[in-house]
Image: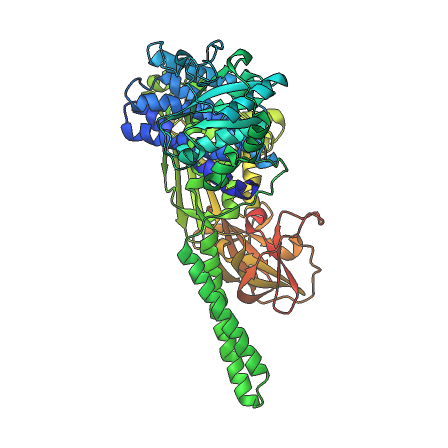
Amino acid sequence: MDVSQYLEIFIDETREHLQSLNEQILILEREPENVDTINEIFRAAHSLKGMAGTMGYKRMQRLTHDMENVFSEIRNGKMKASAKLVDVLFKGLDALEQYLDVIVNSGDEGTEDNEDIIHALNEILNEGLGGGAKETPTAAAPVAAAPAATAAAVATESGVKAIQLAEHEQNAVAKALKEKMNAFSITVYIQESCILKAARAFLVFKALEDLGTVIHSEPSAQEIEDEHFEFDFSVVLLTDKDAEIVKKKVENVSEIKAACIEAIRPETVVQHETVENSEKEAASAPTQKEAAAPANAGAAQQKSTAKPVVNRSVRVDIDKLDDLMNLVSELIIAKNGLVSINTAEVTGLRESGFNEQIEYLERITTNLHQSVMKTRMVPIENVVSRFPRMIRDISKKLDKKMELYMSGEETELDRTVIDEIGDPLMHMLRNAADHGLESNEERIKAGKPEVGSIFLNAYQDGNNVVIEVRDDGRGVDVEKIKKKALEKGTITPEQAAVMTEKEAIELLFRPSFSTAEQISELSGRGVGLDVVKSKIEALGGDVEAKTVLGAGTTFIVRLPLTLAIIQALMVELGQEKYAIPLGSIQTIEDVLPSDIKYVQTKEVIHLRGNVIPLIRLRNVLDIAPDDYVPESLTVVIVAKGDRLAGLVVDNLIGQQEIVIKSIGKYINNNKMIGGATILGDGEVALILDANAIV
């Protein structure tokens, strides 16, 4: 059975289980006795193991199996969760995430066995159980079977149970041994915690059928299929493989505790005269595989290793899909209404009906837009849930005590924004942990709590989502930034003399600018902040930093709720039309030429206590000047954070809902152009990025 069709579900669910394990192990580190957490970790590991086994990912299955073993003993109260165990578990989670990455890219789990992690888990298990972890007996050296006339009996101290063979089965064994094949008596022990014993037994039979022929089982195939057996069963296998290969193949099956094997020796088997007939009988009898298959056909392993096409998916509430369906139904009704009006004969009725249908259609498309938007919205929790683990690892690596406090995880963002925002946020958090927070000793000297605090807060503000990353560390030394900028030649001494604190902090976002004395693995605040800025601005957002020396730094990220359809103000510049996103606009003003002042030869206006620079878009966008001199200027006041600018336009067309289309890679796009939209008459209008202009 090809299980590649389930690959996407496997990937999504594995990500959820890994995230759950990350969160629960963090809790376990703080509360080693928390029974609910221990049970939750056991369940997640158990589910992961079963899923990996079903998909045929043996290495992943083996690692989760050993993690599950440890928690099985912790649940039973036989051992305690130690700090050493938590460290090993986190290494195990990293290894599982690497397996998942390889699966996403290739469809196969790769060849890394992670033996060091498995060994460490088993070592902890042995130590926790007092050095004597209870194991199911494994096969000893082969012991002679009892006389074949009565049974192919074996010594029970080796873990292999006695099996009674019929005459035709003994003949099949004798013939196989003559042909230099091996005949093995095997007893398989299933873990007591296993829920689907029959499914595990089926997988064992399937594994054995790949190696040879199963000629007998106790209990029978039907009893095993009906789960009428305890936690072990025995089989006789004829194969050309050696015992070690057979044992390994069986024990690779999920939830199998042990496989005990003994070779059936030639001297213990009596070949009966009816060999030929018996062989025919054995050949015509249904094999164990055929008998067990109907009940468990879904548990087959994946054969294909072709690269999967992994789509990005969003889980959608069924009610939202119902709303979409209703709106699409109304859209069809509106279309039919327009068709019927088109065929109407009376002109007056036709015109009034047409206007009604257009209004109806407009209402439906607005509702449809909002409904689709809701299906694309994803809680920011999907991104930030991995950060507590990251801060925990950094804390250990740097030997700094720190705690991450998060709020507003339920705030929703468009899926396209969510996919891109993870890396910039991670960069800012790493900088806060590494360079923002002082060492434990410095904090105590400064009269601060020894444990540093990092805060990540998200909330919706109008059509934007604001994410703040704050620390209570040393803050940014503005003078140090200026000094570094002077050394690098980024600014002149004259600029440094008149530079405000805000302008100095802006230097942190310049490429390759850092105040760190040494570049560490995590590096200092400033390294990579240019990448953070460019990535956030590419999403139509902006980032700014505020700092108080000795008290900490706050990075504020503003992001649009969506990138697909926006409300925009359409404006004219000469013969060209442009769109300015409404989210950036504060007000629209009429300004008389006499109200324009100059600061350092730049045009500014004084508006309600603010000095606002003017930007003449005609000059910026290379639009040919004309001779017309207006009595007053139309100025669109836009904001980037708390900075304002006035964009001078020729005419206002009005507010419009526009669909953003990417310009693509063929045009070397200026950053001021955020995309394009197609207007009702088919004309293309460019969308101005107010952030980049400011």
Q: Determine which quarter of the picture holds residue 281.
A: top right
The answer, for residue 436, to whether it is visible in the render is no
Q: Residue at x 35, y 26 (%)?
A: 192
- Considering only vertical position in the picture, is 56 above or below 116? below
Q: Which residue lies furthest to the bottom in this view?
A: 346
Q: Residue at x 57, y 59 (%)?
A: 659
Q: Count all numbered tags in the image, as a single digit.
A: 0
**Residue 214, percent across and down?**
52, 27
Q: Which residue is drawn at 52% across and 34% down?
A: 289
**Residue 394, percent across and down?**
45, 23
Q: Residue at x 46, y 46 (%)?
A: 642
For the N terminus, the image quarter is top right
- Considering only vertical position in the picture, is 66 above or below 131? below
Picture colour scheme: rainbow
**Residue 138, percent across and down?**
44, 14
Pick whichever, 190 or 431, lies toward us: 190
**Residue 620, percent across and down?**
65, 52
Q: Residue furthest front?
A: 273
Pick whichever, 87 or 304, lies toward us: 304
- Considering only vertical position in the picture, is 399 above or below 95? above
Pick whichever, 482 or 433, lies toward us: 433
The answer, for residue 560, to whether it is visible in the render is yes
Left or right placement of residue 594 versus residue 466 in this view: right
Pick whichever, 587 or 206, lies toward us: 206
